[in-house]
Amino acid sequence: MKTSGWCLYALCVCSVAIAACSQTTGFSRFQFTPNVNGVPDRGAGPPSYRVLHSFGSTHDGDYPNAGLIYAGDAFYGTTYGGGRGTHDCGRGYGGCGTVFSITISGAEKVLHSFGRTKTDGRQPYGGLVNVRGTFYGTTGYGGAFDHGTVFSITPDGKEKVLHSFGRGTDGYDPSSVLLDVGGTLYGTTSAGGTNFCASSDGCGTVFSITTSGKERALHNFGKGHDGRFPDAGLIDVHGTLYGTTYKGGAYAQGIVFSITPDGKEKVLHSFGGVTGANPASELIDVKGRLYGTTPYGGTHNSSGTLFSVTINGKERVLHNFGKGTDGSGPYRSLIDVGGTLYGATIHGGAYGLGTLFSITTGGAEKVLHDFRRRTDGSSPLGDLAYKGGSFFGATAYGGSYGDGVVFSLTP
C-alpha cells in the first residue's frame, strides 16, 4: 500500500521547513519549492554556464530529477512528469514521465512517454545505465501492481517492462539508478520487503535482476540497527557493493553499508547530527576511499555535509554546507574529475536556489555557479556528467516554462 509519505517527486510540500518535513515523514523525495529569498531574477548565469534545453513545451518531459549518461553522440535521461502517456498519473505532473535524448548542442527528443499502457511504468525517479547499447532504468510507480518497474529501452525508443514490483514481499518504489556488474543489474527499493516499518509496508530492499528480467531480493532492511529506506543506488568496489540508506542505523539518521552480491550485508557507519544525516546519494570511490553527501546534518543549521568513509567504516566530514552564501542540501552524487570532486546543492547560494560546487579531497570547497530560476533553472536534483571539459546536468525547476532545464557548465 502506498503511504502518504511516498509522494514520489513532491513527497513533502515544504519549501522553508524542508528539514522538518524529512524528520516527520522519514522519506527523502520531497518537493524542492523554489525560494527566491527576495533576490530579483537576473536571467542567465555567467558565460561558462549555458541552458541547452527548457522542459515543459507541448508533450515534452517535465521535472528532470536524475543524472544524464552519454552514449554515441548524445546524452540520455529521464523526466518525472510530462510526455504523451495516456494513463492518468494524477499527481499534478501533466504526464507520467519520459526518456529523452539531447545532443551537446541542445537538440532534444522524447524517446518514450511512460504510462501509455496500464502496465507500463510511470514516473521514473532514477537515471539510466548503459549495458551493451541498451539502457536500463526504474520507475517509482506503474507496472502490474503499481509499485514500480525495471525497464529496458533502446536508443531509438523501444521500451520493455522487465519486472513489476509489488508482488508479495517483493520490494517496491525503486528510486535509484541501477548498477551493472558483469551483465547483472543491482539496485534498491525505497520500501517493501519482509521487515515491517511503521510508516510503510517494508523498510526497503537490495535486489538483483538479469537483463532478461529475473529478479531476486538480496537483502531486506529494517532489523535492529540496520538501515531503512535506501533512496540511493550502489557502487562496486572490488566485488563488494556499497550504498546508503536514508533512515535507520544506531541514530535513526541513515547508514553506509556494504553487501556482497549474494546478500551478506554489514553496517559500516551510522549517521547522526554533526556527522551528517539522511544520505540520499550514491557513493563514489576515489583511490579506495568512499565519498558522499548528506542533505541534512552538519554544523550549519543542518544544511548538509560532504563526507568520506573508508571501506572499514571510518567516517570523516570534509565540508559542512550552509555558511553564508554557500550551497545547502547536497542531494545527489559527486563526480571525480582529475582528483577534484564536483557536485550540486538544491538550496543555498546567492539566490537560495542551489549551486554547483567543486571540492578537493582535503575539503577546500568553491561555489562555481548560483542558480537563478527563470531562464537559468533551479534545484539541480540529478548527478552531473562530464564530457569534453564541461559538466552537464539538469534542474528540476526553472527554465522558459518552469519545468526544468538541461545545462552545461565549463569551469
Image: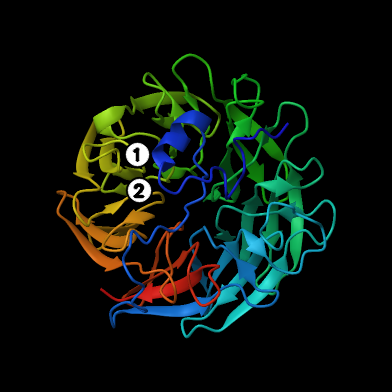
On the image, the x and y values in percent for residue 84 come to: 76, 69
Residue 379, compared with residue 289, is above or below; it is: below
Q: Is residue 313 visible?
A: no
Q: Which mark is residue 296?
A: 1
Q: Position of residue 399 (x, y in %)?
A: 48, 74
Residue displayed at 69% across by 77% down: 58
Foreground residue among 158 and 304 = 304
Crowding at label 2, few (<14), some or many (≥20) Cα neighbours within 10 Å? many
Amino acid type, callout 1 = Tyr
Check if mark 1's residue and mark 2's residue have beta carbons within 8 Å. Answer: yes
- The number of discs equals 2
- x then y, percent, for residue 337: 28, 63
Tag 2, which secondary structure?
Answer: loop
- Left or right, residue 85 beside residue 337: right
Residue 90 as seen in the image, left or right of residue 370: right
Amino acid type at image mark 2:
Gly
Where residue 283 sits: x, y (%)?
A: 38, 45
**Structural crowding at the residue carrying mark 1, measured as other residues with C-alpha within 10 Å and reported as few (<14), some (14–19) or many (≥20):** many
Q: Which residue is mark 2?
A: 329
- Outermost residue toward the top in this view: 224
Vertical position of residue 198 compared to residue 373: above or below: above
Residue found 71% across the figure and 59% down from its top: 96
Q: Is residue 335 left or right of residue 228?
A: left
Secondary structure of the residue carrying numbered label 1: loop
Q: Residue furthest front?
A: 38
Q: Can the viewer see residue 243? A: yes
Q: Which mark is residue 139?
A: none
